[in-house]
Amino acid sequence: MWGGRNGSGSAKLYIPGEDEDEDEDEDGEDEDENEDEDEDGSAGEDSQYFVWADEDVAARELNYRRVTLKEEISTEETDRLIARRKLERAEDSCFECWDDWLRLRLARTSEDVDVRVAMEAAVPAAEVELHHDGDGSARYPPAHRSLRLLECDSDGDSEDEDDPDDGTGAALDYFLRRLEEAGKVHRCDPRSLGDYEDEGEEEAAAFRSLIDIARPPPDDAEMIEVQTKKLEFPPKNENESESDQKAEQEEEDAVSEDEVSYGRALPSWEGYFGAASELLYYSPQVKADYTPLLSQIFRTAATAEAFFEALYFGSVDEALNILNITRKKAPLTCLRSLLYQVGEATYRRPSDHGLVPVRHAPRHCFLKARGTDPPRTWTSALQPRLLQSAKNHPDTKKLVQEARTWYRRSVQYLLQDPKNADETGDYFAAYLRAAHRDVYDDVDRSDPEILRRREHVPSLSKGKKKKHRVGDISVPGVKETFDEWKRLDLEKKPSTAKDRVLSQIIVDAYQTSMVDVSAVLTVARCVAEAKSSKVVVVLYMGGEHTRAVLDFFQKVMGFGYAGLPKKGLCGKMEAWDDEERRALSYPDYLHDFELLFSLPIPSASKKKK
């Protein structure tokens, strides 16, 4: 048998012909082996292939067009496919999809119950505006020399290449479109704020309309240098085909005039720090670095804590006053250079394909919460608005204060011991890749959560007898990392892969906890804006964020589950197996929200559950 992978990532299995008689000639001698196998070892023309792919013919064809043929698939076509599949599942399995269930609840719930939806989705343009400092003459400076010296991006891990499950056309996008038609949907994830490349045309146009033609975002000095000097790409990598390099050149040459001036996204602080999660979890091959910013400007863990708390609970001005970024230090705030320097030669760095949309700390021009003065980030503005809209509620001030304390404690917990605090194992897997690449390449890392807990892991290349002692490998805490950076001299050499991943972990801890706080405040905002005393908020987020929000409302605010079967849990808290059926049988109170308000409320004197 012969196994391999085709262009779209689907497994193939080769089965030689089964009729042995056909392999013999008239004299009874075997024919040339090339009848079934070519000289290069590939399967011959009589071979059979079994392809591991979606059994739904329409979905398989769509993925082939999208991944192999690189076609742009419209949202209308995707929605039609999903709608058809839902009808088929309803007919053959008698279940309804989550979005249909929720739309029905939104339509049927009486006026006495106000139903709201909070989703882990990008903040819309309608809630922000573009802020300018000064006369608009500021320009983003060239990146620090250490960033120009960073090697070009490496290839992605082989298991991620050409994966049809690349996030395009995700369920979240479909649910969002469906539920926003019914209204009362609140988005609560600002990490990609301003990056409208993957948004629908209507939302992208809304972001573009925020730009004042008379005062556009600052020019990018490196982008202008690339264009005016017509810099070339570095010599072709021996593993890169001519077609790959040609496609790269065509993509870069297609950059619009606006992008030459200020990049591919509108600048925002959330977007600037939001790249950390992309680099850690999905695109570790992309070379972008928070190390210069953290090691040379922040310098201590205490400064980082004070800065992020001011940024997400105070004003942008307060946060920047903590750092005191001078003109000389400004190049250190860049995350990725558009230039690649080798000796005396300067090349045009190949594209990051939009994975680092906000390269510079946006000190002079950035998206702020609409109507705020002094300017506040979107998350920061949630708090005073909540206090204003629910000023008569006795718990509002307590919730805002507790959310700030909870944010600080959550980040401290994550960064004190990243390996053990991050139960998903993502931080450990990223660190292992950066600091112990030989081990990373030689172990099964398909489940980072299991890898994190193991003391010994079998070698993939030398058999089970050879084991790597991954239990002895720890991820440095934030204080240890800043102490180590005191010896770092970026004027002599760039940061290491270990430095880069540690800087990304530090930033991501603050960003992840910021999303949790945003979700908590958004839920409170839903209640404050409701026109009824009976409010149901449906929260749709990833598992880790959902657990964090649940933890806040139960352990900090005293919410309970008295009167609910199975402690209010429907489904399971741990990860689902790939082959596990995901259909759930909802209890009556999830079909009729009125039933939630007939449950007994425990008295304050009783022990809370």
Image: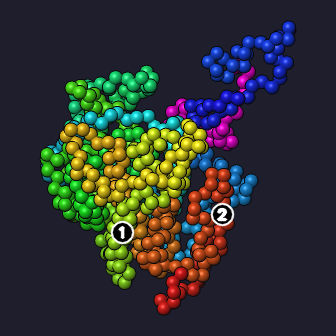
The residue located at (70%, 15%) in the rendering is 34
Residue numbers of the magenta segment: 44-72
Numbered circle sitting on residue 584: 2
Distance from disc 2 to disc 1, alpha carbons, whole Å, reads 35 Å
Q: Give the residue displayed 53% in from the left and 39% down from the top.
A: 159
What's the amino acid at mark 2? Leu
Q: Residues within 10 Å of mark 1 (few under 14, many from 20)?
A: few
Q: How is the image coloured?
A: rainbow
- Residue 557 in the image: state x and y as whole percent: 43, 78
The answer to whether residue 164 is above or below residue 522 is: above
Q: Amino acid at mark 1?
A: Arg
Task: State which quarter of the image contains the N terminus.
Answer: top right
257 or 306: nearer the viewer = 306
Q: Residues within 10 Å of mark 2 (few under 14, many from 20)?
A: few
Give x and y (percent) for residue 91: 73, 54
Q: Quadrant of residue 227?
A: top left
Depth order, front residue of 352/288:
288
Seen as rendered, the residue at the extreme front is 465
Residue that appears at 39% across and 60% down = 417
Q: Which residue is mark 1?
A: 409
